Image (spheres, rainbow, N blue to C red):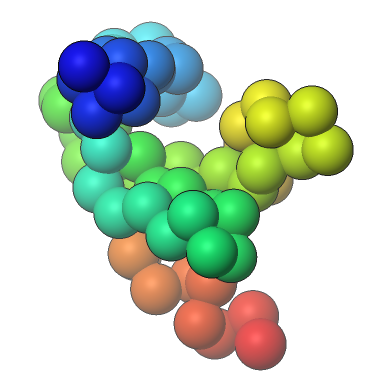
Amino acid sequence: MNEKAEKTYAGKCVDCGSLLELYEVDFRKGIKIMQCTRCGLYHFYKKGFFGKWKLVKVGRVSDLWRKSK
Ligand SMILES: [Zn+2]
């Protein structure tokens, strides 16, 4: 049930406004990647102090996290 809640939590694409679906999540690092269901844009989220996901960047490639390190 928790898993479903996590998956259905979705923001909206900053570009086209469509729903986002979960692409990748890493609870240890507190990061999550959501992908737009329509245009495929990736949205990178970071977990904040209160357990709320915060959008930190958006991009066309899924490995922006790795490049930024
Ligand atoms: Zn989109």
Q: Is residue 37 left or right of residue 20?
A: left
Percent x, y of residue 41: 33, 42
Percent x, y of residue 58: 52, 47
| Residue found at x 25% / y 47% | 23
Whether residue 24 is situated above or below residue 41 in the rendered picture: below
Which quarter of the picture shows residue 13?
top left
Whether residue 35 is situated above or below residue 4 in the rendered picture: below
Which quarter of the picture shows residue 50?
top right
| Residue found at x 49% / y 70% | 64
Task: Inspect this view and state whether residue 60 appears.
Answer: no
Q: Nearer the viewer, residue 39 or 28?
A: 28
| Residue found at x 38% / y 17% | 10
Q: Residue furthest front?
A: 1
Q: Is residue 13 left or right of residue 54?
A: left
| Residue found at x 35% / y 40% | 34
Q: Nearer the viewer, residue 28 or 24?
A: 28
Whether residue 28 is situated above or below residue 13 in the rendered picture: below
Quadrant (top left, top right, bottom left, bottom right) of the C terminus? bottom right
Q: Nearer the viewer, residue 58 or 66?
A: 66
Percent x, y of residue 59: 46, 54
Task: Inspect this view and state whether residue 1 appears.
Answer: yes
